[in-house]
Image (spheres, rainbow, N blue to C red):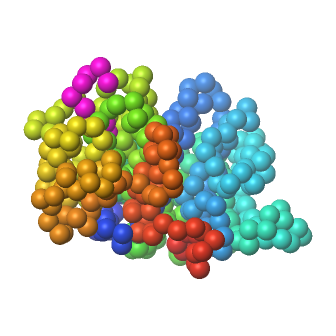
Amino acid sequence: MGGLVECKWGPSHTFGIRQQTHHTTVKHWQETKRILDRLAELTAAGQGAAIACVIRISGSAYRRPGARFLIAADGSTLGGISGGCLEEDVRQTGLGVIETGECRMLHYETGNDDEAMWGLGLGCDGTVDIFVVSAARLGYPKVLNQLRKMLDGNSPFAVITIIGNTSSANGAEFDNRIVVLKTGPDQPKCTGIDEEFLALVRVAAKNGVSHTIEAKGMCAFVELFEPPPYLVICGASDDAIPMVRSAADAGFRVVVLDHRPAYLVSERFPTAWQLIETLPGDDAEIPSTADTFVVLKTHNLTRDKEWARRFLATPVPYLGLLGPQARCEEIVQEATEHDRKRIFGPVGLDLGAEGPEQVGLSVVSELLAVRSGRSPNHLKNRDAPIHDPA
């Protein structure tokens, strides 16, 4: 079974204002955690499961390589590998995989041709390759538990899934092991996998994009995991509740700060990653990395100024300010020209939003646009694919 091996592909991506794009989606890390947690529950209940994973796309595709779909023996599912058009077919395949123990490679052509191989006549003009395999065959619980522990950390890493022989139609001859490639000290070597092939995998991981590789008579899916970004929200009033929920649903690790303990309860913020009772002058340990987004909404001008000074002294790339233009200018009037490039006030996109729920969506939409290096616009006016090439 696969073990941990070292993979040094360089430092984590450095986020730049409206420039740097990230090759893994914000949701990738958190979605994988949820699927592995559900898999642990199924295993404890003695129920088999299969995992479907998008490993290759071309043209238009709703999900990116690495998107997963868990199929339980009772027919229940979690996750997704399309916008809903492929899931039922993949679910049926997954149930068969659980029954037979074989793995399957599915190729979908989502154009208009109903006669195309695995074609569903969806009119999306793309192709999607999906690998479906039983959890036991991937090395559960040992190796998948290693992966789950990595997802509790805060370091980027890569995973390879051995799909099979390049000459094999479905990879059924292989133990489809997962190998976790991580940074840090030397790790035990992975037994049973060609060392030259692993060397090629390490090189492929440096490219920073999840993709399949074929070499040395083997085929593998190389998947990059980047820790999800933080969103720090200063102020735990009621209007923060829908913003926290929307951001967590989008994949952010949401941290809520407030000096009032009665407001910082999990019943109000069940999806928050962390609730911290603190004031700007305290020495509380708060995420302030180059992949941390901050929104100030304490509804107290003096306190917002203090928080702004604290975060502008850190490398955070985004500081959002709730309120009208004049109030925002009052908060950051001493900011340098360089700092103003990362100040977004009033915070959010111009959606005509009204009320906490709509404002929350406006703010989270802006966060996603900034992190993706996109200038918000109507997709109908975009003269390029919706997603960057995989």
Residue 22, picture quadrant: bottom left
Image: magenta residue range: 255-263
Residue at 70% x, 61% y is 105
- Pick out the residue farthest to the bottom: 383
Q: Is residue 179 visible?
A: no
Q: Camera-side residue: 188 or 59?
A: 59
Vertical order, 126 against 277 (above or below) = below
Residue 53: x, y in percent? 61, 55
Q: Residue furthest front?
A: 326
Identify the residue at horizontal 30%, vertical 41% (top origin): 297
- In the rendered image, the vertical position of residue 182 relative to residue 35, given as above or below: below
Image quadrant holding the C terminus, namely bottom right
Residue 23, quarter of picture: bottom left
Q: Name the spot of residue 20 as percent of width and height, x first.
A: 36, 70
Q: Relative to 252, is 358 on the left or the right?
A: right
User: Does residue 262 belong to the magenta stretch?
Assistant: yes
Whether residue 261 appears in magenta in the rendering, the answer is: yes
Q: Residue furthest right?
A: 115
- x and y percentages locating residue 55 in the rendered image: 59, 63
